Amino acid sequence: MSGKIPREFIDDLLVRVDIVDLIDSHVPLKKTGANYVARCPFHTEKSPSFSVNRNKQFFHCFGCGVSGNAISFLMNYSHLDFVEAVEDLAAFIGVDVPRESVEYSGQQKSADLRSLYKVMEQVAVFYVEQLRTNSEGRQAAEYLKHRGVSTSVARDYMLGYAPKKWQVLIDQFGEQALLDAGLLGKSDTGDTYARFRGRVIFPIRDKRGRTIGFGGRVLDDSLPKYLNSPETPLFHKGREVYGLYELLQKQPKPQRILIVEGYMDVVALAEFGFYSAVATLGTATSQAHIDLLFRFASELVFCFDGDNAGQKAADRAMEQAFSSLRDGRQVRVMLLPQSHDPDSLVREIGVDGFVKSIESSETLSDYFFRSVAKGLNLSEMEGRAQLVNTAKPFLDKLPDGVFKGMMYARLEEMSRVASINVSGGVKANLTSNQKMTRATGRPSSARVAMALLLQNPRLAGVVEQKEIDLSRLEFPGVELFKALLETIQDKKPANVAVLLELYRGAAEEKTIKALASLELLVPVEGVEAEFCGAVESLLVRAREAELDRLEAKAKNEGLNPQEKERWLSLLTIKRCSTK
Protein backbone atom coordinates (compact mmCIF):
# COMPACT_ATOMS: atom_id res chain seq x y z
CA MET A 1 0.00 0.00 0.00
CA SER A 2 3.04 2.33 -0.12
CA GLY A 3 2.52 3.63 -3.66
CA LYS A 4 0.81 3.37 -7.00
CA ILE A 5 1.02 0.25 -9.15
CA PRO A 6 3.40 0.97 -12.06
CA ARG A 7 1.70 1.23 -15.45
CA GLU A 8 4.40 -1.01 -16.96
CA PHE A 9 3.45 -3.80 -14.54
CA ILE A 10 -0.24 -3.56 -15.44
CA ASP A 11 0.60 -3.70 -19.15
CA ASP A 12 2.89 -6.69 -18.63
CA LEU A 13 0.20 -8.42 -16.55
CA LEU A 14 -2.32 -8.08 -19.38
CA VAL A 15 0.21 -9.53 -21.82
CA ARG A 16 1.07 -12.51 -19.62
CA VAL A 17 -2.48 -13.52 -18.66
CA ASP A 18 -4.73 -15.45 -21.05
CA ILE A 19 -8.25 -14.09 -20.65
CA VAL A 20 -9.75 -17.41 -21.79
CA ASP A 21 -8.00 -19.28 -18.97
CA LEU A 22 -8.97 -16.60 -16.45
CA ILE A 23 -12.67 -16.50 -17.34
CA ASP A 24 -12.88 -20.27 -17.79
CA SER A 25 -11.75 -20.65 -14.16
CA HIS A 26 -14.87 -18.69 -13.12
CA VAL A 27 -17.36 -19.40 -15.92
CA PRO A 28 -16.97 -22.63 -17.98
CA LEU A 29 -16.42 -21.69 -21.62
CA LYS A 30 -17.16 -23.62 -24.79
CA LYS A 31 -15.20 -23.07 -28.01
CA THR A 32 -17.30 -21.94 -30.96
CA GLY A 33 -15.33 -20.93 -34.05
CA ALA A 34 -12.68 -18.36 -33.17
CA ASN A 35 -14.39 -17.44 -29.88
CA TYR A 36 -15.33 -19.04 -26.59
CA VAL A 37 -18.90 -18.65 -25.36
CA ALA A 38 -20.95 -19.09 -22.20
CA ARG A 39 -24.16 -17.89 -20.66
CA CYS A 40 -23.43 -14.41 -19.36
CA PRO A 41 -22.54 -14.26 -15.65
CA PHE A 42 -23.79 -10.67 -15.46
CA HIS A 43 -27.44 -11.16 -16.47
CA THR A 44 -29.95 -13.99 -16.71
CA GLU A 45 -30.24 -15.63 -20.11
CA LYS A 46 -31.21 -18.98 -21.60
CA SER A 47 -28.81 -19.11 -24.55
CA PRO A 48 -25.14 -18.04 -24.57
CA SER A 49 -24.44 -14.48 -25.66
CA PHE A 50 -21.22 -14.00 -23.66
CA SER A 51 -18.19 -14.22 -25.97
CA VAL A 52 -14.46 -14.29 -25.19
CA ASN A 53 -11.84 -13.71 -27.88
CA ARG A 54 -8.34 -15.01 -27.27
CA ASN A 55 -6.72 -12.95 -30.04
CA LYS A 56 -8.19 -9.70 -28.76
CA GLN A 57 -7.93 -10.71 -25.07
CA PHE A 58 -11.39 -9.21 -24.78
CA PHE A 59 -14.85 -10.32 -23.62
CA HIS A 60 -18.24 -9.00 -24.70
CA CYS A 61 -21.84 -9.90 -23.97
CA PHE A 62 -24.18 -9.27 -26.89
CA GLY A 63 -27.11 -9.44 -24.47
CA CYS A 64 -26.36 -6.90 -21.73
CA GLY A 65 -23.46 -5.10 -23.44
CA VAL A 66 -20.83 -5.55 -20.70
CA SER A 67 -17.30 -5.86 -22.12
CA GLY A 68 -13.64 -5.34 -21.35
CA ASN A 69 -10.30 -6.99 -20.64
CA ALA A 70 -9.19 -9.34 -17.86
CA ILE A 71 -9.13 -6.58 -15.25
CA SER A 72 -12.63 -5.47 -16.21
CA PHE A 73 -13.90 -9.04 -15.88
CA LEU A 74 -12.60 -9.42 -12.34
CA MET A 75 -13.98 -6.00 -11.35
CA ASN A 76 -17.45 -7.00 -12.59
CA TYR A 77 -17.47 -10.68 -11.63
CA SER A 78 -15.86 -10.47 -8.19
CA HIS A 79 -17.11 -6.96 -7.36
CA LEU A 80 -13.61 -5.53 -6.94
CA ASP A 81 -12.21 -2.07 -7.37
CA PHE A 82 -9.38 -1.54 -9.84
CA VAL A 83 -6.49 -2.14 -7.42
CA GLU A 84 -8.12 -5.27 -5.98
CA ALA A 85 -8.66 -6.65 -9.49
CA VAL A 86 -5.00 -6.07 -10.41
CA GLU A 87 -3.95 -7.82 -7.19
CA ASP A 88 -6.22 -10.80 -7.94
CA LEU A 89 -4.99 -10.99 -11.53
CA ALA A 90 -1.37 -10.96 -10.32
CA ALA A 91 -2.19 -13.74 -7.85
CA PHE A 92 -3.80 -15.74 -10.68
CA ILE A 93 -0.50 -15.92 -12.56
CA GLY A 94 1.60 -16.06 -9.40
CA VAL A 95 3.43 -12.72 -9.28
CA ASP A 96 3.68 -10.00 -6.66
CA VAL A 97 2.36 -6.50 -7.24
CA PRO A 98 5.14 -3.90 -7.09
CA ARG A 99 4.52 -0.37 -5.85
CA GLU A 100 6.05 2.88 -6.96
CA SER A 101 7.85 4.83 -4.26
CA VAL A 102 5.96 8.08 -3.68
CA GLU A 103 6.17 10.83 -1.13
CA TYR A 104 2.97 11.34 0.83
CA SER A 105 2.01 14.72 2.22
CA GLY A 106 -0.17 15.98 5.05
CA GLN A 107 -2.42 13.33 6.54
CA GLN A 108 -0.99 10.51 4.43
CA LYS A 109 2.52 10.97 5.89
CA SER A 110 1.28 10.12 9.38
CA ALA A 111 -1.14 7.39 8.36
CA ASP A 112 0.33 4.26 6.84
CA LEU A 113 -2.78 2.45 5.69
CA ARG A 114 -1.78 -0.99 6.86
CA SER A 115 -1.13 0.20 10.39
CA LEU A 116 -4.44 2.07 10.35
CA TYR A 117 -6.34 -1.07 9.35
CA LYS A 118 -4.63 -2.91 12.18
CA VAL A 119 -5.50 -0.24 14.76
CA MET A 120 -9.14 -0.14 13.61
CA GLU A 121 -9.45 -3.92 13.87
CA GLN A 122 -7.91 -3.96 17.33
CA VAL A 123 -10.18 -1.14 18.55
CA ALA A 124 -13.22 -2.98 17.16
CA VAL A 125 -12.24 -6.04 19.20
CA PHE A 126 -11.70 -3.80 22.24
CA TYR A 127 -15.24 -2.39 21.90
CA VAL A 128 -16.69 -5.92 21.63
CA GLU A 129 -14.91 -6.90 24.85
CA GLN A 130 -16.24 -3.78 26.61
CA LEU A 131 -19.81 -4.77 25.70
CA ARG A 132 -19.29 -8.14 27.37
CA THR A 133 -17.14 -7.30 30.38
CA ASN A 134 -17.46 -3.62 31.30
CA SER A 135 -20.13 -2.68 33.87
CA GLU A 136 -21.27 0.13 31.56
CA GLY A 137 -21.20 -2.32 28.69
CA ARG A 138 -23.76 -4.50 30.41
CA GLN A 139 -26.19 -1.56 30.26
CA ALA A 140 -25.54 -1.39 26.51
CA ALA A 141 -26.11 -5.14 26.25
CA GLU A 142 -29.45 -4.70 28.02
CA TYR A 143 -30.37 -1.93 25.57
CA LEU A 144 -29.63 -4.23 22.61
CA LYS A 145 -31.58 -7.05 24.23
CA HIS A 146 -34.52 -4.68 24.74
CA ARG A 147 -34.33 -3.82 21.02
CA GLY A 148 -34.55 -7.53 20.23
CA VAL A 149 -30.93 -8.02 19.13
CA SER A 150 -29.73 -11.57 19.76
CA THR A 151 -26.21 -12.63 20.68
CA SER A 152 -25.69 -14.24 17.27
CA VAL A 153 -26.66 -11.10 15.32
CA ALA A 154 -24.55 -8.94 17.64
CA ARG A 155 -21.66 -11.28 16.86
CA ASP A 156 -22.32 -11.18 13.09
CA TYR A 157 -22.21 -7.37 13.11
CA MET A 158 -19.46 -7.22 15.74
CA LEU A 159 -21.44 -4.82 17.96
CA GLY A 160 -19.55 -3.25 20.85
CA TYR A 161 -19.53 -0.50 23.45
CA ALA A 162 -17.35 2.60 23.86
CA PRO A 163 -16.85 3.31 27.58
CA LYS A 164 -17.13 6.82 29.01
CA LYS A 165 -13.62 6.47 30.46
CA TRP A 166 -11.62 6.54 27.28
CA GLN A 167 -8.05 7.06 28.49
CA VAL A 168 -7.61 3.30 28.34
CA LEU A 169 -7.69 3.63 24.56
CA ILE A 170 -4.62 5.89 24.57
CA ASP A 171 -2.86 3.61 27.04
CA GLN A 172 -3.44 0.65 24.75
CA PHE A 173 -3.04 2.08 21.23
CA GLY A 174 -1.25 5.43 21.46
CA GLU A 175 -2.61 8.91 20.88
CA GLN A 176 -1.26 9.55 17.37
CA ALA A 177 -2.57 6.27 15.96
CA LEU A 178 -6.04 7.02 17.36
CA LEU A 179 -5.96 10.55 15.95
CA ASP A 180 -5.04 9.20 12.52
CA ALA A 181 -7.87 6.66 12.75
CA GLY A 182 -10.40 9.37 13.63
CA LEU A 183 -11.12 7.87 17.05
CA LEU A 184 -9.73 10.91 18.84
CA GLY A 185 -10.20 14.55 18.00
CA LYS A 186 -8.76 17.86 19.15
CA SER A 187 -10.82 20.76 20.45
CA ASP A 188 -10.26 24.40 19.50
CA THR A 189 -8.09 24.72 22.58
CA GLY A 190 -5.94 21.78 21.52
CA ASP A 191 -7.30 19.33 24.07
CA THR A 192 -7.70 15.71 23.01
CA TYR A 193 -11.08 14.02 23.34
CA ALA A 194 -12.60 10.67 22.35
CA ARG A 195 -15.26 10.84 19.66
CA PHE A 196 -17.15 7.82 20.98
CA ARG A 197 -18.08 7.76 24.67
CA GLY A 198 -20.91 5.86 26.32
CA ARG A 199 -22.29 4.58 23.02
CA VAL A 200 -23.23 1.27 21.40
CA ILE A 201 -20.68 0.81 18.63
CA PHE A 202 -21.38 -0.40 15.09
CA PRO A 203 -18.14 -1.20 13.21
CA ILE A 204 -18.29 -0.16 9.56
CA ARG A 205 -16.55 -2.74 7.41
CA ASP A 206 -15.65 -2.58 3.73
CA LYS A 207 -16.58 -5.40 1.36
CA ARG A 208 -13.35 -7.20 2.24
CA GLY A 209 -14.24 -7.22 5.94
CA ARG A 210 -11.73 -4.58 7.04
CA THR A 211 -12.91 -2.15 9.71
CA ILE A 212 -12.74 1.34 8.21
CA GLY A 213 -14.90 3.37 10.60
CA PHE A 214 -17.41 3.29 13.42
CA GLY A 215 -20.92 4.44 14.18
CA GLY A 216 -22.11 5.04 17.72
CA ARG A 217 -25.58 5.35 19.28
CA VAL A 218 -26.42 6.82 22.69
CA LEU A 219 -28.33 4.75 25.24
CA ASP A 220 -30.60 7.63 26.27
CA ASP A 221 -32.26 10.58 24.55
CA SER A 222 -29.18 12.83 24.48
CA LEU A 223 -28.02 14.36 21.20
CA PRO A 224 -26.60 13.64 18.76
CA LYS A 225 -28.32 10.27 18.79
CA TYR A 226 -25.92 8.83 16.17
CA LEU A 227 -22.31 9.71 15.55
CA ASN A 228 -20.03 8.52 12.74
CA SER A 229 -16.28 8.41 12.24
CA PRO A 230 -14.90 11.48 10.48
CA GLU A 231 -13.30 11.30 7.04
CA THR A 232 -9.96 9.47 7.24
CA PRO A 233 -7.58 7.83 4.75
CA LEU A 234 -9.70 4.69 5.22
CA PHE A 235 -13.20 6.08 5.55
CA HIS A 236 -15.25 8.22 3.15
CA LYS A 237 -18.88 8.11 4.21
CA GLY A 238 -20.13 9.33 0.82
CA ARG A 239 -18.79 6.12 -0.75
CA GLU A 240 -19.44 3.49 1.93
CA VAL A 241 -22.54 1.81 3.35
CA TYR A 242 -23.14 -0.06 6.58
CA GLY A 243 -23.85 -3.79 6.44
CA LEU A 244 -22.54 -4.61 2.95
CA TYR A 245 -19.84 -6.99 4.17
CA GLU A 246 -22.32 -8.83 6.41
CA LEU A 247 -24.83 -9.01 3.56
CA LEU A 248 -22.28 -10.55 1.19
CA GLN A 249 -21.26 -13.10 3.83
CA LYS A 250 -24.85 -14.37 3.86
CA GLN A 251 -25.67 -13.77 0.17
CA PRO A 252 -22.65 -13.54 -2.16
CA LYS A 253 -24.94 -12.83 -5.12
CA PRO A 254 -28.00 -11.00 -3.76
CA GLN A 255 -31.02 -10.55 -6.01
CA ARG A 256 -31.79 -7.13 -4.53
CA ILE A 257 -30.42 -4.76 -1.89
CA LEU A 258 -32.60 -2.66 0.41
CA ILE A 259 -31.21 0.77 1.32
CA VAL A 260 -32.44 1.97 4.73
CA GLU A 261 -31.61 4.96 6.91
CA GLY A 262 -30.02 3.62 10.11
CA TYR A 263 -27.70 1.05 11.64
CA MET A 264 -30.44 -0.39 13.84
CA ASP A 265 -32.71 -0.86 10.82
CA VAL A 266 -30.07 -3.12 9.26
CA VAL A 267 -29.49 -5.06 12.50
CA ALA A 268 -33.21 -5.42 13.29
CA LEU A 269 -33.97 -6.82 9.84
CA ALA A 270 -31.06 -9.27 10.17
CA GLU A 271 -32.66 -10.48 13.40
CA PHE A 272 -35.56 -11.69 11.26
CA GLY A 273 -33.23 -13.40 8.79
CA PHE A 274 -33.44 -10.54 6.29
CA TYR A 275 -29.78 -9.82 5.50
CA SER A 276 -30.35 -7.86 2.29
CA ALA A 277 -30.30 -4.38 3.87
CA VAL A 278 -27.58 -1.74 4.06
CA ALA A 279 -27.64 1.80 5.46
CA THR A 280 -26.11 5.05 4.35
CA LEU A 281 -23.91 6.62 6.99
CA GLY A 282 -25.74 9.71 8.17
CA THR A 283 -25.68 11.22 4.69
CA ALA A 284 -27.98 11.32 1.68
CA THR A 285 -27.79 8.43 -0.79
CA SER A 286 -25.12 9.37 -3.33
CA GLN A 287 -24.40 8.18 -6.85
CA ALA A 288 -21.23 6.57 -5.45
CA HIS A 289 -23.42 4.53 -3.06
CA ILE A 290 -25.68 3.48 -5.93
CA ASP A 291 -22.80 2.56 -8.25
CA LEU A 292 -21.22 0.52 -5.44
CA LEU A 293 -24.40 -1.45 -4.74
CA PHE A 294 -25.20 -2.05 -8.41
CA ARG A 295 -21.92 -3.99 -8.58
CA PHE A 296 -23.55 -6.64 -6.39
CA ALA A 297 -27.26 -6.63 -7.28
CA SER A 298 -29.36 -5.64 -10.28
CA GLU A 299 -32.21 -4.25 -8.15
CA LEU A 300 -32.00 -1.58 -5.45
CA VAL A 301 -34.90 -0.59 -3.19
CA PHE A 302 -34.89 2.77 -1.42
CA CYS A 303 -36.72 2.24 1.90
CA PHE A 304 -37.55 5.49 3.73
CA ASP A 305 -40.07 6.76 6.25
CA GLY A 306 -43.37 7.90 4.75
CA ASP A 307 -43.19 11.40 6.27
CA ASN A 308 -42.06 14.56 4.46
CA ALA A 309 -38.42 13.99 5.41
CA GLY A 310 -38.57 10.43 4.05
CA GLN A 311 -40.13 11.59 0.79
CA LYS A 312 -37.43 14.24 0.37
CA ALA A 313 -34.76 11.59 1.01
CA ALA A 314 -36.41 9.34 -1.59
CA ASP A 315 -36.51 12.20 -4.11
CA ARG A 316 -32.79 12.91 -3.59
CA ALA A 317 -31.92 9.23 -3.94
CA MET A 318 -34.03 8.98 -7.10
CA GLU A 319 -32.18 11.93 -8.65
CA GLN A 320 -28.82 10.28 -7.93
CA ALA A 321 -29.96 6.97 -9.44
CA PHE A 322 -30.73 8.26 -12.94
CA SER A 323 -27.12 8.37 -14.16
CA SER A 324 -26.56 4.78 -12.99
CA LEU A 325 -29.65 3.22 -14.56
CA ARG A 326 -28.78 1.16 -17.61
CA ASP A 327 -30.69 -1.72 -19.15
CA GLY A 328 -30.88 -4.67 -16.75
CA ARG A 329 -30.87 -2.49 -13.61
CA GLN A 330 -33.95 -1.60 -11.60
CA VAL A 331 -34.75 0.74 -8.71
CA ARG A 332 -37.84 0.67 -6.50
CA VAL A 333 -39.03 3.19 -3.91
CA MET A 334 -40.65 1.88 -0.72
CA LEU A 335 -42.16 4.56 1.52
CA LEU A 336 -43.12 3.10 4.89
CA PRO A 337 -46.50 3.64 6.56
CA GLN A 338 -46.66 6.59 8.96
CA SER A 339 -45.10 5.96 12.41
CA HIS A 340 -43.25 2.89 11.13
CA ASP A 341 -39.56 2.19 10.53
CA PRO A 342 -38.25 -1.09 9.06
CA ASP A 343 -37.80 -2.52 12.58
CA SER A 344 -41.39 -1.89 13.69
CA LEU A 345 -42.90 -2.86 10.33
CA VAL A 346 -41.17 -6.24 10.09
CA ARG A 347 -42.26 -7.01 13.68
CA GLU A 348 -45.85 -6.16 12.81
CA ILE A 349 -46.24 -7.95 9.47
CA GLY A 350 -43.43 -10.51 9.64
CA VAL A 351 -40.59 -11.05 7.20
CA ASP A 352 -42.85 -12.61 4.52
CA GLY A 353 -45.14 -9.61 4.64
CA PHE A 354 -42.13 -7.30 4.59
CA VAL A 355 -40.77 -9.00 1.45
CA LYS A 356 -44.22 -8.73 -0.20
CA SER A 357 -44.22 -5.01 0.62
CA ILE A 358 -40.85 -4.68 -1.13
CA GLU A 359 -42.06 -6.58 -4.18
CA SER A 360 -45.18 -4.42 -4.45
CA SER A 361 -43.32 -1.13 -3.95
CA GLU A 362 -43.28 1.47 -6.72
CA THR A 363 -40.85 1.17 -9.59
CA LEU A 364 -38.61 4.17 -10.08
CA SER A 365 -40.47 5.09 -13.28
CA ASP A 366 -43.88 5.14 -11.55
CA TYR A 367 -42.53 7.03 -8.54
CA PHE A 368 -40.75 9.55 -10.77
CA PHE A 369 -43.72 10.40 -12.97
CA ARG A 370 -46.07 10.55 -9.98
CA SER A 371 -43.62 12.87 -8.25
CA VAL A 372 -43.01 15.27 -11.16
CA ALA A 373 -46.73 15.39 -12.05
CA LYS A 374 -47.80 16.15 -8.48
CA GLY A 375 -49.75 19.41 -8.35
CA LEU A 376 -49.85 19.84 -12.15
CA ASN A 377 -53.05 20.05 -14.17
CA LEU A 378 -52.26 17.83 -17.14
CA SER A 379 -55.55 18.73 -18.83
CA GLU A 380 -54.03 22.14 -19.51
CA MET A 381 -51.22 22.87 -21.96
CA GLU A 382 -49.32 24.86 -19.33
CA GLY A 383 -49.30 21.93 -16.91
CA ARG A 384 -48.10 19.52 -19.58
CA ALA A 385 -45.35 21.95 -20.63
CA GLN A 386 -44.20 22.22 -17.02
CA LEU A 387 -44.17 18.42 -16.80
CA VAL A 388 -41.83 18.18 -19.80
CA ASN A 389 -39.57 20.95 -18.49
CA THR A 390 -39.33 19.27 -15.09
CA ALA A 391 -38.91 15.69 -16.26
CA LYS A 392 -36.62 16.09 -19.26
CA PRO A 393 -33.40 17.10 -17.39
CA PHE A 394 -33.69 13.89 -15.35
CA LEU A 395 -34.38 11.67 -18.36
CA ASP A 396 -31.41 13.16 -20.20
CA LYS A 397 -29.16 11.74 -17.47
CA LEU A 398 -30.21 8.18 -18.31
CA PRO A 399 -27.66 6.16 -20.30
CA ASP A 400 -28.77 5.41 -23.87
CA GLY A 401 -30.82 2.25 -24.14
CA VAL A 402 -34.29 0.73 -24.16
CA PHE A 403 -35.20 2.09 -20.71
CA LYS A 404 -34.38 5.66 -21.72
CA GLY A 405 -36.50 5.31 -24.84
CA MET A 406 -39.43 3.93 -22.83
CA MET A 407 -39.19 6.73 -20.25
CA TYR A 408 -39.36 9.31 -23.05
CA ALA A 409 -42.32 7.46 -24.57
CA ARG A 410 -44.10 7.68 -21.19
CA LEU A 411 -43.37 11.41 -21.00
CA GLU A 412 -44.68 11.92 -24.54
CA GLU A 413 -47.87 10.04 -23.62
CA MET A 414 -48.46 12.08 -20.46
CA SER A 415 -47.63 15.42 -22.09
CA ARG A 416 -49.39 14.61 -25.40
CA VAL A 417 -46.29 15.75 -27.27
CA ALA A 418 -45.75 13.69 -30.41
CA SER A 419 -41.94 13.65 -30.23
CA ILE A 420 -39.59 15.05 -27.59
CA ASN A 421 -35.98 15.49 -28.65
CA VAL A 422 -33.72 13.25 -26.63
CA SER A 423 -30.53 15.11 -25.69
CA GLY A 424 -27.71 12.83 -26.80
CA GLY A 425 -30.06 9.87 -26.65
CA VAL A 426 -31.82 7.23 -28.69
CA LYS A 427 -33.92 9.69 -30.73
CA ALA A 428 -31.14 12.12 -31.56
CA ASN A 429 -30.35 12.75 -35.23
CA LEU A 430 -28.09 10.12 -36.70
CA THR A 431 -24.79 11.09 -38.26
CA SER A 432 -24.31 10.37 -41.95
CA ASN A 433 -22.08 7.39 -41.08
CA GLN A 434 -24.72 5.94 -38.74
CA LYS A 435 -27.37 6.35 -41.45
CA MET A 436 -25.13 4.54 -43.91
CA THR A 437 -24.55 1.71 -41.44
CA ARG A 438 -28.25 1.35 -40.76
CA ALA A 439 -29.19 1.53 -44.46
CA THR A 440 -26.65 -1.00 -45.70
CA GLY A 441 -26.62 -3.27 -42.64
CA ARG A 442 -22.81 -3.11 -42.44
CA PRO A 443 -20.40 -0.73 -40.71
CA SER A 444 -19.28 2.43 -42.48
CA SER A 445 -15.72 2.79 -43.73
CA ALA A 446 -14.96 5.01 -40.73
CA ARG A 447 -16.08 2.39 -38.21
CA VAL A 448 -14.27 -0.36 -40.10
CA ALA A 449 -11.01 1.63 -40.12
CA MET A 450 -11.22 2.54 -36.42
CA ALA A 451 -12.30 -0.95 -35.34
CA LEU A 452 -9.55 -2.65 -37.34
CA LEU A 453 -6.92 -0.27 -35.95
CA LEU A 454 -8.12 -0.86 -32.38
CA GLN A 455 -8.34 -4.62 -32.77
CA ASN A 456 -4.98 -4.80 -34.58
CA PRO A 457 -2.64 -2.14 -33.12
CA ARG A 458 0.10 -3.27 -35.52
CA LEU A 459 -1.78 -1.46 -38.31
CA ALA A 460 -0.40 1.82 -36.98
CA GLY A 461 2.85 0.79 -38.66
CA VAL A 462 1.03 0.45 -42.00
CA VAL A 463 -0.04 4.10 -41.80
CA GLU A 464 3.58 5.14 -41.33
CA GLN A 465 4.93 2.82 -44.06
CA LYS A 466 2.44 3.96 -46.68
CA GLU A 467 2.79 7.61 -45.60
CA ILE A 468 -0.99 8.07 -45.49
CA ASP A 469 -1.86 11.76 -45.14
CA LEU A 470 -4.37 11.75 -42.28
CA SER A 471 -4.62 15.54 -42.17
CA ARG A 472 -7.01 15.40 -45.15
CA LEU A 473 -9.50 13.04 -43.53
CA GLU A 474 -12.97 14.39 -42.79
CA PHE A 475 -15.60 12.22 -41.10
CA PRO A 476 -17.47 12.10 -37.75
CA GLY A 477 -15.02 10.56 -35.30
CA VAL A 478 -11.86 11.51 -37.18
CA GLU A 479 -10.38 13.09 -34.05
CA LEU A 480 -10.80 9.83 -32.14
CA PHE A 481 -9.20 7.93 -35.05
CA LYS A 482 -6.19 10.24 -35.01
CA ALA A 483 -5.94 10.14 -31.21
CA LEU A 484 -6.13 6.34 -31.25
CA LEU A 485 -3.37 6.18 -33.83
CA GLU A 486 -1.23 8.59 -31.81
CA THR A 487 -1.78 6.57 -28.64
CA ILE A 488 -0.71 3.35 -30.36
CA GLN A 489 2.38 4.97 -31.88
CA ASP A 490 3.33 6.53 -28.53
CA LYS A 491 2.52 3.72 -26.07
CA LYS A 492 3.06 0.73 -28.40
CA PRO A 493 0.51 -1.54 -26.64
CA ALA A 494 1.28 -5.23 -27.01
CA ASN A 495 -2.35 -6.24 -27.54
CA VAL A 496 -5.93 -4.99 -27.47
CA ALA A 497 -6.27 -5.59 -23.72
CA VAL A 498 -3.38 -3.22 -22.97
CA LEU A 499 -4.78 -0.63 -25.38
CA LEU A 500 -8.21 -0.81 -23.70
CA GLU A 501 -6.61 -0.28 -20.32
CA LEU A 502 -5.14 3.02 -21.52
CA TYR A 503 -8.70 4.31 -22.02
CA ARG A 504 -10.11 3.17 -18.65
CA GLY A 505 -12.11 6.02 -17.18
CA ALA A 506 -11.65 8.21 -20.26
CA ALA A 507 -14.53 9.95 -22.02
CA GLU A 508 -13.93 7.72 -25.06
CA GLU A 509 -14.01 4.43 -23.11
CA LYS A 510 -17.56 3.49 -24.13
CA THR A 511 -16.85 4.11 -27.82
CA ILE A 512 -13.52 2.25 -27.64
CA LYS A 513 -15.23 -0.81 -26.12
CA ALA A 514 -17.93 -0.73 -28.80
CA LEU A 515 -15.27 -0.71 -31.53
CA ALA A 516 -13.36 -3.53 -29.83
CA SER A 517 -16.50 -5.70 -29.79
CA LEU A 518 -17.44 -4.98 -33.42
CA GLU A 519 -17.48 -8.26 -35.39
CA LEU A 520 -15.96 -7.52 -38.82
CA LEU A 521 -15.50 -11.13 -40.03
CA VAL A 522 -12.24 -10.28 -41.79
CA PRO A 523 -9.76 -13.19 -42.09
CA VAL A 524 -6.37 -12.57 -40.49
CA GLU A 525 -4.58 -12.52 -43.86
CA GLY A 526 -6.99 -9.86 -45.16
CA VAL A 527 -6.88 -7.41 -42.23
CA GLU A 528 -4.22 -5.10 -43.69
CA ALA A 529 -5.89 -4.91 -47.12
CA GLU A 530 -9.30 -4.26 -45.54
CA PHE A 531 -7.86 -1.49 -43.37
CA CYS A 532 -6.06 0.18 -46.27
CA GLY A 533 -9.19 -0.07 -48.37
CA ALA A 534 -11.32 1.57 -45.67
CA VAL A 535 -8.80 4.40 -45.16
CA GLU A 536 -8.53 4.94 -48.92
CA SER A 537 -12.32 5.12 -49.17
CA LEU A 538 -12.32 7.82 -46.49
CA LEU A 539 -9.55 9.72 -48.27
CA VAL A 540 -11.47 9.57 -51.58
CA ARG A 541 -14.58 10.88 -49.88
CA ALA A 542 -12.58 13.68 -48.25
CA ARG A 543 -10.97 14.65 -51.56
CA GLU A 544 -14.37 14.74 -53.26
CA ALA A 545 -15.79 16.97 -50.50
CA GLU A 546 -12.76 19.28 -50.72
CA LEU A 547 -13.04 19.42 -54.54
CA ASP A 548 -16.75 20.34 -54.28
CA ARG A 549 -15.94 23.15 -51.86
CA LEU A 550 -13.17 24.55 -54.07
CA GLU A 551 -15.34 24.42 -57.21
CA ALA A 552 -18.16 26.23 -55.39
CA LYS A 553 -15.73 28.90 -54.21
CA ALA A 554 -14.27 29.23 -57.72
CA LYS A 555 -17.73 30.07 -59.07
CA ASN A 556 -18.68 32.50 -56.30
CA GLU A 557 -15.47 34.19 -55.13
CA GLY A 558 -12.53 32.88 -57.11
CA LEU A 559 -9.50 30.97 -55.84
CA ASN A 560 -6.14 32.22 -54.63
CA PRO A 561 -2.98 30.66 -56.16
CA GLN A 562 -2.58 28.04 -53.43
CA GLU A 563 -6.24 27.00 -53.68
CA LYS A 564 -6.07 26.84 -57.46
CA GLU A 565 -2.99 24.60 -57.24
CA ARG A 566 -4.80 22.32 -54.81
CA TRP A 567 -7.89 22.24 -57.08
CA LEU A 568 -5.80 21.19 -60.09
CA SER A 569 -4.08 18.53 -57.99
CA LEU A 570 -7.42 17.08 -56.87
CA LEU A 571 -8.73 17.09 -60.43
CA THR A 572 -5.64 15.17 -61.59
CA ILE A 573 -6.07 12.58 -58.82
CA LYS A 574 -9.76 12.17 -59.71
CA ARG A 575 -9.06 11.72 -63.43
CA CYS A 576 -6.31 9.18 -62.77
CA SER A 577 -8.54 7.16 -60.43
CA THR A 578 -11.35 6.95 -63.01
CA LYS A 579 -9.16 5.65 -65.84
Image (spheres, helix red, strand yellow):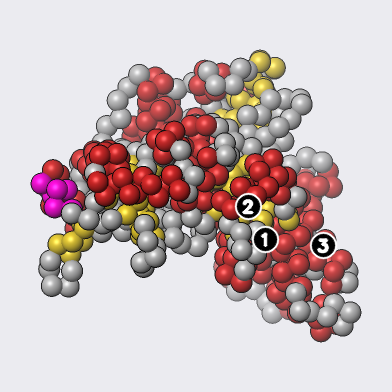
Please tell me the numbered disc located at residue 337. 1
Mark 1 or 3, nearer chain start: 1
Dot 1 lies on which element? loop
Q: Over which residues does the magenta segment extend?
A: 166-171
Give the Cα distance between marks 2 and 3: 33 Å
| Disc on the earlier residue, 2 or 1 | 1
Image location (x, y in percent) of residue 385: 79, 79
Q: Residues within 10 Å of mark 2 (few under 14, many from 20)?
A: some
- Residue 33 in sight from this viewpoint: yes
Q: Residue at x 67, y 22 (%)?
A: 38
In screen coordinates, is 49 left or right of 503? right
Q: CA distance from mark 1 to mark 3?
A: 28 Å
Up the image or down, 564 lies above or below 377; here it is above
The image quadrant where one finds the N terminus is: top left
Amino acid type assigned to the residue bearing label 2 in the image? Leu
| Residue at 81% in and 84% down | 382
Q: Secondary structure at mark 2?
A: helix
> Which image quarter holds the C terminus?
top right
Q: Which residue is mark 3?
A: 410
Residue at 70%, 74% in the rendered image: 390
Dot 3 amino acid type: Arg
Q: Position of residue 425 (x, y in %)?
A: 71, 59
Q: Residue at x 42, y 27 (%)?
A: 89
Front residue of 534/377: it is: 377
**Where is mark 2, residue-wise?**
345
Q: Which secondary structure class fits the magenta region best?
A: helix
When the figure is inspected, residue 554 is found, relative to residue 176, above or below; the finding is below
Nearest the camera: 495 or 253?
253
Query: Is label 2 or label 3 in front?
Result: 2
Residue 522 x, y percent position in the rendering: 69, 28
